[in-house]
């Protein structure tokens, strides 16, 4: 089955993460190649799984345009990861720089892991009538390509803020290091959640750590979470040193952050908002209806519009502007997952 | 005095700060609307808040909420006001900046002082000896699509190369497109309407009910001749649903056999109909439709109402439908039960009577084995007239503007972000050239390197 192949790809992403860490620490070129190789192999397996999934969908839908596996939450998460990993590998190749691969593999690992711990259905489902449209392909794929670009700008933005903030008591510094710490904790927790679950269908997020039935483990997990955040907060100089030794300049990070947004924003506008509106116009008889998904897409759009205006008109530079990129992606995640998990609306086929 | 106030007001509306503030306030307002239930009826709102507080405080909260229209955010006066401010901000901004930008295109470029050039983030110097160097650089830039300008300065020859300078206008195209979209939305609100109609199979309606509950006469009648839902095999997931529509104007049918499907709307007289929903609604005129295959294999169509006797053709048997189930299932103990109110697998209980002897049998639409009766093969086709089709009805003269605005926005954004103006500067002295670029983009550095390589290659 396709989802098993994709799970294997996820495993490769997860294994790539420690190899990237070893590379950061040793700067050994061979280790670097191994890390990239691991991530690329994951991506290749992922593409193979994607094609398998496509074939499974084709058996049901008999239409090439409507068999692209981006029709439910699971498939969209998987597609998002694929776009982000490929986007990162492209940047790695173009800039000859493996600096933030570890964070990409963390985000990829978390996302693939989420499909397990949130209990999202992985079965191939037939299309409901509302999704039977050629706009599906254009609207959904472009949206997720944009999300992936925002994801990359989030990672580089975060690193940029940490690298450039001198005052360790400032909000943006504490905020960014907390996110890094939380991401690492979530990454590890998801691995434990999946490994320790007795039944693969009943894995729950943080069930083996923060929400463990044993109070001792639960308290220990909370301490671990706080410790990880503290370590990132306290010892970020070490991280900065490593980044600097890899010839990562703040300018490079700021530039990649900008490029991710400059690429993602028009794609998001055309694919997410405009194509979405045209499709809604044809399917539901209104191009805009303040559905939660629509509303949050607009908010996402505003945040990135804010970024561009701050950069070009107000001339904002440095960490100030990278913070907007970080917040922008948090809003994006909410638009993508939060709306489906917490709010109801017409995009419910994107739910679990 | 008045002028100064005027200027202040103008500057307020022309400021990017206002735009950014509006981005934030509109976002927060819109976000509130996705959390608090949007309903003019108080019950859903109170129910929502009673999850977090006591009932009496939920009632009080509702009062505050309805005071600020937080249960109807997107149509509230303050949200409309914010959108209006947003539009005004865009207009004033453009009027404020556009003329200066256009003027700057007409002004002849001036040489930059060396101090300014030295502050630029990219600076590269190469040593070179070539008499025709100026010509060469000029040609290099020209081949890459730049316009070039030369100045003689104290430090040597200054060269300015510019490309895509006019793409700075695209920002205003993007802003204009937002105004066009807002205008389209405004036109739709004032000159259009939205409503819905539920038409029972076999009947017609000549009005729709608006979202506010008002009756909207259409000026023609929409009849639903037939409605059908297809399900995926062995599941209750609908695959497709279709309404077969007839339009009757002044008593005459003007359109027949029109199919409306999800994602395939139908427009008549500027009013568009969208397949939105459907439902089960038994009516007096509902008709059970059968096909009877006699011994010679000939097919006979039979229509009958509920409990109405009909004759099985070419026999003395009479029959009638005495029970109906839209989705018949069999439970663990072998009993029949209704799985759903949707017509996933409609079935009828038919009572047969021959010479006073009565028998009865369930006939299931999707299970051919059940069509065999002691009196021949009786296939149950459908229960016609027991479902309604839910159509969304809309007239929106603003839609063309929305489409035009959307296209312009995409074009504007792509030019804005992918074709940004590129500027290079070069100072040519006797035996060295220094390149400068004001923005650090990976591409820029690469291009400079490329040019340097070319120049050096030529020299060798």
Image: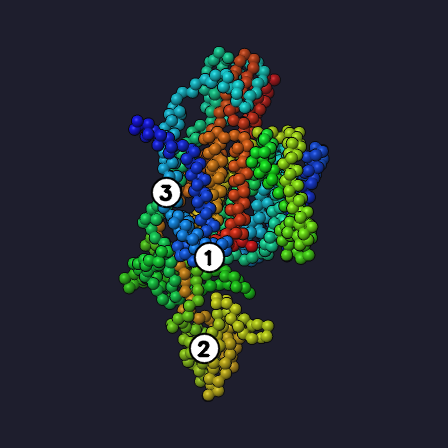
Rendering coords of residue A254 (x, y %): 56, 32
Of the residues under marks 3 and 2, which one precedes in the sequence? 3
Q: Which residue is mark 1?
A: B55
Q: Residue at x 43, y 55 (%)?
A: B59
| B311 relative to A88 in the view: left or right | left
Front position among marks 3 and 1: 1
Front position among marks 2 and 1: 1
- Tags 2 and 1 in contact by the CB under 8 Å rule? no
Of the residues under marks 3 and 1, which one precedes in the sequence? 1
Q: Which residue is mark 2?
A: B321
Of the residues under marks 2 and 1, which one precedes in the sequence? 1
Which residue is more in the foreground, B399 or A185?
Answer: A185
Indicate the secondary structure of the residue bearing disc 1.
helix
> Neighbour class for label 1 at 10 Å: few (<14), some, many (≥20)?
some
Chain label for disc 1: B
CA gap between label 3 and label 1 equals: 33 Å
Indicate the secondary structure of the residue bearing disc 2.
strand
Quarter of the image with the N terminus of chain B in it? top left
Query: Which residue in the rendered view is the most extreme toward the left?
Result: B250
Could you confirm whether marks 3 and 2 are on the same chain? yes
Classify B23 as above or below B3.
below
Rendering coords of residue B301 (x, y %): 43, 74
Q: Which residue is mark 3?
A: B81
Q: Residue at x 41, y 65 (%)?
A: B388
Q: How many marks?
A: 3
Rendering coords of residue A225 (x, y %): 65, 44
- Tags 3 and 1 in contact by the CB under 8 Å rule? no
């Amino acid at each position: 089955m396709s989802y098993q192949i994709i799970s294997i790809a996820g495993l490769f992403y997860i294994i790539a993460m420690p190899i990237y860490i070893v590379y950061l620490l040793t700067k050994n070129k061979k280790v670097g190649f191994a890390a990239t190789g691991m991530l690329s192999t994951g991506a290749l397996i992922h593409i193979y799984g994607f094609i398998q999934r496509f074939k499974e969908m084709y058996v049901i839908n008999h239409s090439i345009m409507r068999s692209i596996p981006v029709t439910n939450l699971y498939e969209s998460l998987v597609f998002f990861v694929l776009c982000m990993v490929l986007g990162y590998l492209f940047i790695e190749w173009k800039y000859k720089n493996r600096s933030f691969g570890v964070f990409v593999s963390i985000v990829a690992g978390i996302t693939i892991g989420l499909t397990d711990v949130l209990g999202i259905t992985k079965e191939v489902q037939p299309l409901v009538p509302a999704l039977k449209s050629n706009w599906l392909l254009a609207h959904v794929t472009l949206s997720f390509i944009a999300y992936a670009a925002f994801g990359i700008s989030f990672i580089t933005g975060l690193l940029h803020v940490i690298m450039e903030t001198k005052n360790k008591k400032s909000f943006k510094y504490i905020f960014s290091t907390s996110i890094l710490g939380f991401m690492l904790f979530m990454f590890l927790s998801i691995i434990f959640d999946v490994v320790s679950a007795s039944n693969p269908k009943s894995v729950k997020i943080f069930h083996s750590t923060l929400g463990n039935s044993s109070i001792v483990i639960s308290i220990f997990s909370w301490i671990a979470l706080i410790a990880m955040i503290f370590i990132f907060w306290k010892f970020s100089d070490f991280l900065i040193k490593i980044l600097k030794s890899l010839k990562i300049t703040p300018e490079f990070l700021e530039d990649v952050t900008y490029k991710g947004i400059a690429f993602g924003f028009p794609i998001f506008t055309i694919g997410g908002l405009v194509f979405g509106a045209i499709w809604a116009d044809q399917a539901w008889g209104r191009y805009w209806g303040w559905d939660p998904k629509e509303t949050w897409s607009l908010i996402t759009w505003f945040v990135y519009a804010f970024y561009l205006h701050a950069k070009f008109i107000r001339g904002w530079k440095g960490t100030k502007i990278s913070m907007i990129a970080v917040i922008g992606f948090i809003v994006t995640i909410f638009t993508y997952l939060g709306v489906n998990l917490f709010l109801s609306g017409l995009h419910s086929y994107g739910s679990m | 005095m008045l002028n100064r106030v005027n200027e202040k007001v103008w500057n307020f509306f022309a400021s990017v700060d206002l735009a950014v503030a509006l981005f934030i306030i509109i976002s927060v307002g819109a976000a509130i609307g996705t959390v608090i239930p949007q309903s003019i009826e108080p019950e859903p709102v109170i129910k929502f808040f009673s999850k977090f507080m006591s009932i009496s405080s939920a009632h009080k909260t509702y009062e505050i909420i309805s005071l600020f229209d937080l249960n109807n955010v997107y149509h509230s006066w303050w949200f409309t006001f914010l959108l209006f401010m947003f539009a005004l901000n865009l207009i004033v901004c453009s009027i404020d900046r556009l003329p200066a930008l256009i003027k700057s295109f007409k002004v002849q470029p001036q040489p930059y002082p060396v101090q300014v050039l030295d502050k630029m983030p990219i600076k590269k110097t190469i040593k070179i000896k070539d008499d025709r160097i100026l010509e060469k650089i000029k040609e290099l830039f020209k081949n890459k699509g730049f316009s070039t300008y030369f100045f003689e300065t104290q430090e040597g020859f200054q060269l300015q190369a510019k490309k895509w300078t006019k793409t700075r206008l695209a920002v205003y195209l993007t802003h204009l497109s937002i105004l066009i979209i807002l205008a389209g939305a405004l036109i739709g609100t004032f000159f259009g309407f939205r409503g819905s109609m539920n038409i029972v199979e076999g009947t017609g309606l000549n009005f729709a009910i608006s979202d506010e509950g008002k009756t909207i006469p259409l000026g023609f009648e929409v009849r639903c001749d037939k409605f059908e839902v297809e399900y995926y095999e062995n599941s209750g997931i609908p695959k497709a649903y279709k309404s077969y529509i007839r339009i009757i104007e002044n008593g005459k049918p003007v359109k027949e056999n029109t199919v409306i499907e999800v994602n395939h709307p139908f427009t008549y007289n500027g009013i568009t109909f969208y397949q939105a929903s459907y439902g089960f609604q038994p009516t007096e005129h509902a008709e059970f439709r059968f096909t009877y295959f006699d011994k010679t294999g000939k097919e006979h169509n039979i229509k009958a109402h509920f409990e109405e006797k009909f004759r099985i053709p070419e026999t003395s048997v009479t029959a009638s439908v005495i029970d109906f189930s839209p989705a018949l299932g069999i439970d663990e103990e072998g009993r029949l039960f209704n799985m759903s109110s949707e017509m996933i697998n409609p079935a009828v209980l038919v009572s047969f009577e021959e010479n006073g002897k009565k028998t009865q049998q369930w006939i299931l639409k999707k299970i051919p084995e059940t069509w065999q009766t002691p009196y021949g093969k009786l296939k149950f086709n459908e229960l016609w007239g027991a479902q309604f089709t839910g159509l969304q009805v809309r007239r929106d003269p603003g839609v063309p503007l929305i489409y035009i605005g959307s296209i312009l926005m995409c074009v504007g954004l792509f030019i804005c972000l992918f074709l940004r103006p590129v500027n290079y500067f070069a100072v040519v002295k006797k035996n060295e050239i220094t390149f400068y670029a004001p923005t650090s983009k990976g591409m820029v550095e690469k291009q400079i390197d490329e040019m340097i390589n070319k120049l050096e290659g030529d020299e060798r």
